[in-house]
Image (cartoon, rainbow, N blue to C red):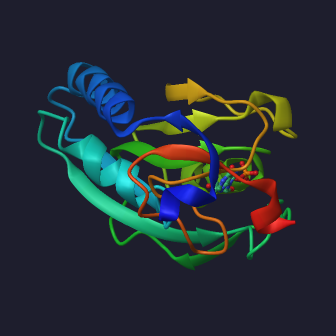
Amino acid sequence: MLTDDLKSVLFTEEQIAKRVSELGAELTRDYEGKDPLVIGILKGASVFTTDLIRHMNTPMQLDFMVVSSYGSGTKTSGSVKIRKDADADMRDRHVIVCEDIIDSGVTMSNLFPLFETRKPASLKLCALLSKPSRREVEIKIDYLGWEVPDEFLVGYGLDYAERYRNLPCIGVLKPEIYS
Ligand code: IMP
Ligand code: MG
């Protein structure tokens, strides 16, 4: 079974569902009448983003970007590549960027200045997870699911070498899998 590769489960499917619905309710409240543009960062945030928007009870628009910074290892390379840009025009829109996890912060610190040049009405970051102990650049997370310890996590969109994204829970991969 896929879960056999986990050392431990950090968040169960039920815990994730509850937290994501809470975040969605917060966004519903904060973005009422603002017709926000939610931009999910693929592939990691795919599962989170599509769950989250179903808890946003307000008109909104969904878009995705494909960004890569990791290759198949477990450490960031420091450079960020936009493989597919958003289709929607961000100008004068209330943009919510949706990320799976903020680790070093390098990815978002590269993307946010670029987004600012597109003149959105507002720009906020919503991340399911954050590893503060790993931060190399300071990042303001406006909506956050949980802070997590410095361990390599998989599931609920998070991958190791493109695997484990389909796990419904979030867990710590056994070190022997990637060492
Ligand atoms: P950052 O640029 O270092 O903040 O890295 C952000 C990206 O690294 C995230 O969007 C994830 O795709 C990936 N990442 C960081 N930590 C983990 C992890 O524990 N498991 C899986 N992917 C991770
Ligand atoms: Mg990612």
Q: Nearer the viewer, residue 71 or 66?
A: 71
Above or below for 126 versus 47: above
Above or below for 2 versus 122: below
The C terminus lies in quadrant: bottom right
Q: Nearer the viewer, residue 92 or 103?
A: 103
Q: Looking at the picture, how far across and down is residue 2, in whole percent? A: 50, 64
**Horizontal side, residue 15 vs residue 172: left or right:** left
Q: Nearer the viewer, residue 172 or 84?
A: 172
Q: Is residue 39 visible?
A: yes
Number of disc labels: 0
Q: Looking at the picture, how far across and down is residue 128, in whole percent? A: 49, 37
Above or below for 164 versus 103: below
Q: Looking at the picture, how far across and down is residue 161, in whole percent? A: 66, 74
Q: Is residue 38 visible?
A: no
Above or below for 56 versus 152: above
- Residue drawn at 42 percent across, 56 percent down: 40
**Horizontal side, residue 102 vs residue 132: left or right:** left
- Residue drawn at 83 percent across, 30 percent down: 133
Q: Looking at the picture, how far across and down is residue 25, in whole percent? A: 23, 23
- Residue drawn at 47 percent across, 68 percent down: 65
Q: Quarter of the image holding residue 59?
A: top left
- Residue drawn at 33 percent across, 33 percent down: 20
Residue farthest toward the bottom in the current orientation of the protein: 83
**Horizontal side, residue 3 vs residue 121: left or right:** right
Q: Quadrant of ligand 2?
A: bottom right
